[in-house]
Image (cartoon, rainbow, N blue to C red):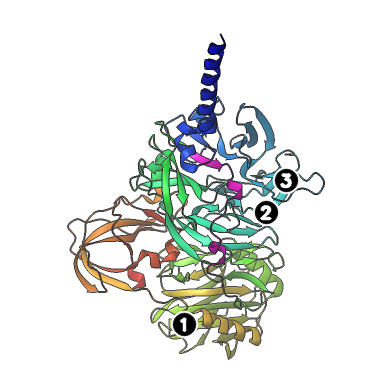
Amino acid sequence: MTQCKKYWRIIILLLVSAFLSGPAMGESKDKVGQWTGRHTRLVWLQDQGNGSDTLAHGQNLMLYGYDSADGRGERPLLPNVGNHFKPLITPDGTQVVVSNRISRQMYLVEWESGKVKELGSGVAVAIWQDPRPSLLLRKSTTWVYCFSGLQPENKYGTSQPLYRFPLDKPEKKELIWDKTNLAWSNIQLSRDGELIGGLFPWPDAGVLSTKDRQWQRLGKGCWTSLSPDNSKLLWIFDGLHRNVQMHSATGGGSWNVNINGAPGIGGYEVYHPRWSNHPRYFVITGPYEKGDGGNRIGGGGEKVEIYIGRFDEQARSVEDWIKVTDNGRADFYPDLWIEGGNEASLADSIAQADSPVQTESWPASREHLVFVWENMKAANQLDEKSPVGFFQSNIDLRGTALYTRDFQLATGGGWGETGEAGKKIGAALARTGRAGVEFTLIPERDQQGRIVSLKAGDKPGVVIAQQGENLLVDIAGGSVSWPGLLVAGKPLHLVVNITDDSLELFAQGKSLGKKAGKVDFSGATVDSLIFGDPAGGWHGTLAGLAVYDQTLEPPVIATNSRLAGERTGETAAAEKLVVEGNLDETTEIPAPDALGAYRRALVVNTYSVNRVESGEYDRNRVLVAEWAVLDRTLVKTYDVAAPPERLVLEKFADHPELEGERQMMDVFEPDLEMYYRIPQSAQ
């Protein structure tokens, strides 16, 4: 009997030893937990319908979860099928906040039990834990950020204000931002809570300072994501849906990272990119193989699974991938939580690199601004103290207008519209009866066309135009002219001061004299502001566009002219490659109506290279991105019998203005560098 007990003790000790030596919580058998090295949870939406509800509008969605420690694999967190939107894992990993966008209600789901608690009205878009404990209870607060209200919305964004509330006190909402529209994905905060990243709205990507409520534009695109540490990196998803452009909000540097290289993606588009709570890890969904040429994302499909990527220590590239789901159904909107992620950081050198040089900003005085557009990349924002209040000045490209690689407006025979800015400007000018109009232009040719128009409905407004070498200002009583001023290819800074009885022109900071002319801003109220000529008569570039509700003083004009001159020519010319080639492989040209919110689209094709006219190129084929749709109009067709074409090309990487443009690519040529075909109007 004693001998038997001895053997049983040995067996028990061996079993205990074997148990203790193995990984806890079943992670030895879990590929995801082994790959991350930490307890990992993933939540997402699974489409129970035809797999095309990529933006989670419908009612055939289930809330799914994956826990590396429970050994249960993919499983529903809730049993019901319905509308679920943008699930978010709480910072401690124990709960999920999810919304119903149809009923506009928010819910808190316990991961282990599936217990559901109502959080009230709204749509949750972010969760952040304040690292500073409260003074009274020494307990940190978890905040839920949500859109709430009855203001209009669409599938891309909303005009509803952004609020936040403590997770344990959902009735205590605080207003965070109501100055601009916002997009649904992705709003995120830095660890210290000083920055909110997002689209303000699509496609204007940037960060909002929570201290002074100042917004900083970093680029254009979609599906932004802000690093969850304090490195203050914001990525912007590109129009190809294959790369993100990393931007340092504090250092000013930027770089491109490919995120569709996971095994199984096959070069196709990916979607729903989102940083996890750990700055080295992120999630995507893909591949998107279905759908029409203009909307592969909307096609979804049963092959769409969830992948986790791991960045290198500086988020310069993706060093490894793992495929998490494998279920034959479309999986959307993933959110990833990794234990200890809230303590991890990217390499310190990230925050120290590319420190921006502080320079004097244009315009020198903002006191009477009613419109300001420095360039495509600038904030172009008026604060609440301006005569029109807070206003985001934007330009909508029309016709063949595009942006240049240094972010200026290139009309190319097209024009730029400014939306509701015209009416705000008109009201301000009607109050003062005066105006100052400032811009820097480079005319491309000897031509006749409108440059800047302050239109007043069917009544004469103010039109600044080119007629050969002459600058004209057309007003109700006729026109005034300054001859011999405009030279093709030469930058020129201009200010036109307008009163009720005179016009004064300043060129390069110096007055060219006053001329008589009557302008009645109260009798003919301005209602639109247009840059360029809708009739196609003006080709050139414009930057530093401003309208004031007062005339500008000569010292301010001189300073602005100096600043404009310093800005002009800052970007070095890109190297050109000119080849003769024949169209080889093509990408399906999208129907303009299939582009969703986009008005322009590039297609990526390959051309066989017959000869190199100028530049250096040693391959027999070239990968080319070229415009197929401009302003919802087809500008390209394919003709297999066409003669060889002359292609004027520059490296696509040298054109950051294309970052947020919609790009279609059906060809897969990972070994060919992509070039951008310069439009005929810009050659």
- Vertical comparison of 110 with 405: above or below: above
Q: CA distance from mark 2 to mark 1?
A: 39 Å
Q: Which residue is mark 1?
A: 491
Residue 261, x across and y down, in percent: 37, 49
Mark 1 packing: few (<14 Cα in 10 Å), some, or many (20+)?
A: some
Q: Nearer the viewer, mark 2 or mark 1?
A: 2
Q: Amino acid at mark 1?
A: Pro
- Vertical comparison of 481 with 80: above or below: below
Magenta segment range?
332-356
- Is residue 7 found inside the magenta-colored segment of the image? no
Figure quadrant of the C terminus: bottom left
Q: Amino acid at mark 3?
A: Ser
* Residue 63 in sight here: no
Q: Which residue is mark 2?
A: 177
Q: Which residue is mark 3?
A: 140
* Residue 287 in sight here: yes
358 vs 18, nearest the viewer: 18
Q: CA distance from mark 2 to mark 3?
A: 23 Å
Q: Quadrant of residue 256?
A: bottom left
607 vs 351, nearest the viewer: 351
